[in-house]
Image (cartoon, rainbow, N blue to C red):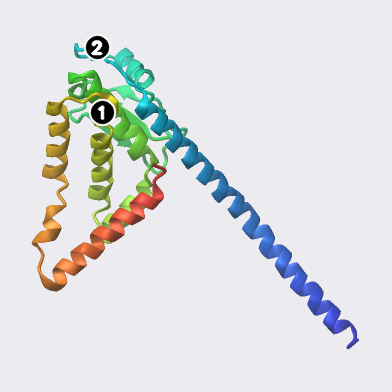
Amino acid sequence: MKPFLPLMAALSGRRSLIFLLALVAPLSIAMSRAHGEVEARKTFERRSARIKVVAPQTAPAISQDSVDLALVMFGIPVPPNAEHPKLDRELRDRGLTARGAFMEKAQVTIGPSAFTSWGLLASTLAHELEVHCRQSFFLIYVMDLAGLDGTGEAERQAYVHELRNAKRFGLDRGDADLIADTMEYYYPLHVVGKAKGAGALAARVKTWLSTNALRNSAAF
């Protein structure tokens, strides 16, 4: 039997290699596909940003038709993991993205306060669809439990996305200031700078962790 031991060992090693490849190959394909989708989405957004959209000067009517038109006019895609955004006349915020454990898709609703201009309506839709719908709500929840301010970081990313795309949406100075002031008031970053010594270092580490963890989980 001894002469067969090296052969058996070789076969065992080959089986292990095949098994490992069988595990790694699908993961590699999935990562490659995900990377391709992200790059395609970024290319689409870059091209959309270069298109000059001249929206009507009058404020959009508070209606579902205005929501649908803004999506088309400003080239804002609805992600596969989200329902088509709907008008909610009772919503006090400009927009809201809800995703629960038993929800098949994220539900995006738009409130009347987003309809003061076409630019603000488009910016609100991008805030919800292009950022929040791509973020991991589970990761945000875990980060909050760990004291990493996942909710705050998620919102900051969405507001920064609005400001970076201000020209794309044709936001006037008043709307841009509104967005910046809202972010500063509800989700400020300067609180990190108030800490001293070890507290300052801990605050910076937490901010770095939350920013990078959430950015890496989002497809934008």
Judge depth for marks 2 and 1 and give the one in front. 1
**SS label for mark 2:** loop
When the figure is inspected, residue 102 is found, relative to residue 71, above or below; the finding is below
Q: Mark 1 points at which residue?
A: 167
Q: Along the polypeptide, which appears first: circle 2 or circle 1?
A: 2
Give the numbered dot on residue 77.
Answer: none
Residue drawn at x 54%, y 50% as measured from the top left: 31
Q: Can residue 64 be seen in this view?
A: yes
Q: Classify the position of the N terminus by image quarter.
A: bottom right
Residue drawn at x 40%, y 50% as measured from the top left: 217
The percent position of residue 36, horizontal first and vertical second, equals 53, 42
Which amino acid type is marked by label 2? Answer: Pro
Quadrant of the image occupied by residue 12? bottom right
Which amino acid type is marked by label 1? Answer: Lys
For residue 183, side relative to residue 28 (left or right)? left
When the figure is inspected, residue 130 is found, relative to residue 111, above or below; the finding is below
Q: Is residue 147 visible?
A: no
The percent position of residue 120, horizontal first and vertical second, equals 22, 25
The percent position of residue 64, horizontal first and vertical second, equals 31, 16
Q: Considering depth in this image, is 47 or 112 the residue closer to the camera?
A: 47
Q: Residues within 10 Å of mark 1 (few under 14, many from 20)?
A: some
Residue drawn at x 31%, y 52% as measured from the top left: 141
Q: Mark 2 points at which residue?
A: 56
**SS label for mark 1:** helix
